[in-house]
Image (cartoon, coloured by chain):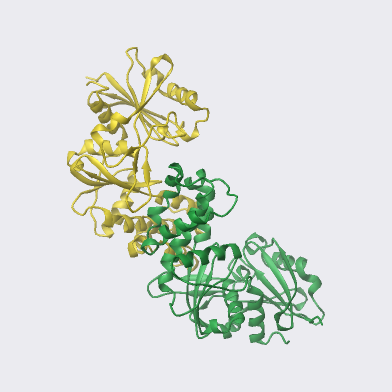
Chain colours: A yellow, B green
Amino acid sequence: MVSAPRLIALDWGSSQLRAYLLGDGGVVLAERHSADGASRLAGGAPAFEQALASLVSDWWTEGGLPVLACGMVGSAHGWREVPYAACPVALDSLHEQAGVVRMAGQRDVRIVPGLCWTPADGPPDVMRGEETQVLGLLAAQAAWAEGSTLVLPGTHSKWVSVRDGRVTSFATHMTGELFALLCAHSVLGRLMQPAPGFDTAAFERGVHSGASGGGAALGRWLFSVRTLGLFQALSPESLADYLSGLLIGSELGAALPGAAPDHPLVLAGEPVLCERYALALGLLGRAAVLGPQAPAAAGLWRLARQAGWVGG
Amino acid sequence: MVSAPRLIALDWGSSQLRAYLLGDGGVVLAERHSADGASRLAGGAPAFEQALASLVSDWWTEGGLPVLACGMVGSAHGWREVPYAACPVALDSLHEQAGVVRMAGQRDVRIVPGLCWTPADGPPDVMRGEETQVLGLLAAQAAWAEGSTLVLPGTHSKWVSVRDGRVTSFATHMTGELFALLCAHSVLGRLMQPAPGFDTAAFERGVHSGASGGGAALGRWLFSVRTLGLFQALSPESLADYLSGLLIGSELGAALPGAAPDHPLVLAGEPVLCERYALALGLLGRAAVLGPQAPAAAGLWRLARQAGWVGG
């Protein structure tokens, strides 16, 4: 028997809007997406309302299904700015800091707050959207809430420390963005050729080099993407995988010493990218667990349940 | 009394061709430049010959003034590929590895080889053009040939170790290119606004952070350009100087431990950039000497004299 719809859950990032119609227990009844990411919508609140309506208005019911969103939709350039919740923060009470916007027809859209973290000895850090993925991951495996390091690779990789149901700290590494920039716009990209497949050996070579010296070697090694290409020590088709290894290795070299050794290390995100991280972690002697893909819907469901915004 | 012309000296880089007419003792009689950099010239040798002729053909004499060039003109995509001279290399004999192209009218253009260096524990490295700047710097101050670290800041900063008249090793840091990429194309550039002047405090803050942990902190600190802007801890006008400090600090944190503490550290290049490096070095407790600007002409003269290609 198909469940009745209970929640419209929105993973609304910078470049994409992804909508889930969730039923009892958070089961996904339907899923849609559009290119109406928060950074692509000019025109303020009406543009967001219009983008949402054009994607899911047929999901709306007379009774008024609750709508919950996470991601850059809650940033200063989003639909409504929702202040960051400061770490350490208990994930069970995150809903108390949610924001709300009221649409035409008295329909409310609630927005999950992002997180901020200011360590004593380092710069402040922020996330929007990943906190909801964290909620979804902890819903998948209750033991991870007791103590874990969650690694969410991507444009801006996040390393999230969880203990006793709280996010105690996190750090952002711009690994994916650096990779894209260097391939597209730097001298390193000039020798690169598209590859027919993944060059494991070139990637592994990069990981070992990038991770050496706690990640400090990056400045020394980056230019080697060019020189190894010039000297034909690596083929033009292998240079991007080598650079990927250097950057991921450098991230791991810098971040691993801060990851509690007795806690599981959980990877979640795009499968191809998670495989690369798992391979690199293995090379550096650290095991990783693969979490469920796309945990945002599960996180939104969990938060809505905690808040009492849905039954079921 | 004005000296007779003795040498046409060409500093022929990727993006620019700079020509000097040199007289006795290497005195600069005239200087010109054009946008015909080596990476902008399609069409092989005839394009290079044409670019040179259109800039300096009125400098040519019947007797046949010698022409000597350095830089990317000697690369695989230049006029003629000249193999790299391998370090350690004695600068006094570098001319023996020069290449030569013969133009119409039996006129020869000699090209200085670049250098390559392959450390036992690291990637290979290369330079083209900077070896000639090194020659010019050592011509300016003979003591630097005995032992010095020459720092040439720029798109690809070079740290060159000199001892007993030899380049013993060198390293490339892509600091300038990373700065330009991150300002122009990354999320970090989005909050930046043009500044009326240099924000020393923001720069110094960046240097201290970037240099910490031997430069390993870059991955951890880069995203702080965004967060310090978001939290208005730095103004939009100060973010570029802060990022500049982070990147230069990271370069210094990685490179300084390899610079012989008993040798002078010499900075040469664009004055504004050298000032930033001198300031950063001072913050990290290391004094630097400012070398002469634009030492390429002096280096070309010195090499031509060593080779016996010019009198005077």
User: What residue is rendered at 69% in x and 60% in y?
Assistant: B35
Residue A155 placed where, x, y %?
41, 46
Residue A97 placed where, x, y %?
32, 31
Tally of numbered discs: 0
User: What residue is rendered at 21% in x and 49% in y?
Assistant: A264
Residue A174 placed where, x, y %?
41, 50
Q: Is residue A69 left or right of residue B75?
A: left
Q: Residue furthest front?
A: B201
The image quarter in which residue A241 lies: bottom left
The quadrant of the image that shows the N terminus of chain A is top left
Residue B22 placed where, x, y %?
73, 77
User: What residue is rendered at 59% in x and 62% in y?
Assistant: B272
The quadrant of the image that shows the C terminus of chain A is top left
Note whether B80 is above or below A69 in the view shown: below
The image quarter in which residue B50 lies: bottom right
Q: Is residue A269 visible?
A: yes
Residue sitting nearer the eye, A289 or B82 = A289
